[in-house]
Amino acid sequence: MLNPKQCVGLLFAVFFTAACVPKIQLETPKEGITINMNVEVEHKIQIETDENTRKILGE
């Protein structure tokens, strides 16, 4: 069994160990985030087919 000095020492050790837990805070900005994207997308799709497929499609 633990004597009184050991009990007090153990209580202090537990207290100080528990008191040293790091605290992490995340804060969101008060104003929203605005992302302006001026993007122009242009695609050119070219499909090559064989002669039999062109006959079926009627081209």
Image (cartoon, rainbow, N blue to C red):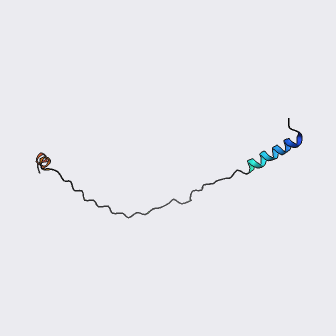
Say which of 47 and 24 sits in front.
47
Where residue 21 sits in the image (x, y, percent)? 70, 50
Q: Is residue 3 left or right of residue 49?
A: right
Viewport quadrant of the N terminus: top right
Q: Residue at x 63, y 54 (%)?
A: 25
Q: How many marks?
A: 0
Where residue 19 sits in the image (x, y, percent)? 75, 50
Q: Residue at x 33, y 63 (%)?
A: 40
Where residue 51 sits in the image (x, y, percent)? 12, 50
Q: Is residue 46 left or right of residue 15?
A: left
- Does residue 10 sit above or below 36 in this rendering? above
Q: Residue at x 84, y 45 (%)?
A: 9
Say which of 59 and 3 sits in front.
3
Q: Is residue 58 left or right of residue 7?
A: left
Q: Residue 46 sits in which quadrant?
A: bottom left
Where residue 27 sits in the image (x, y, percent)? 59, 56
List the single residue furthest toward the top: 1
Q: Residue at x 19, y 53 (%)?
A: 48
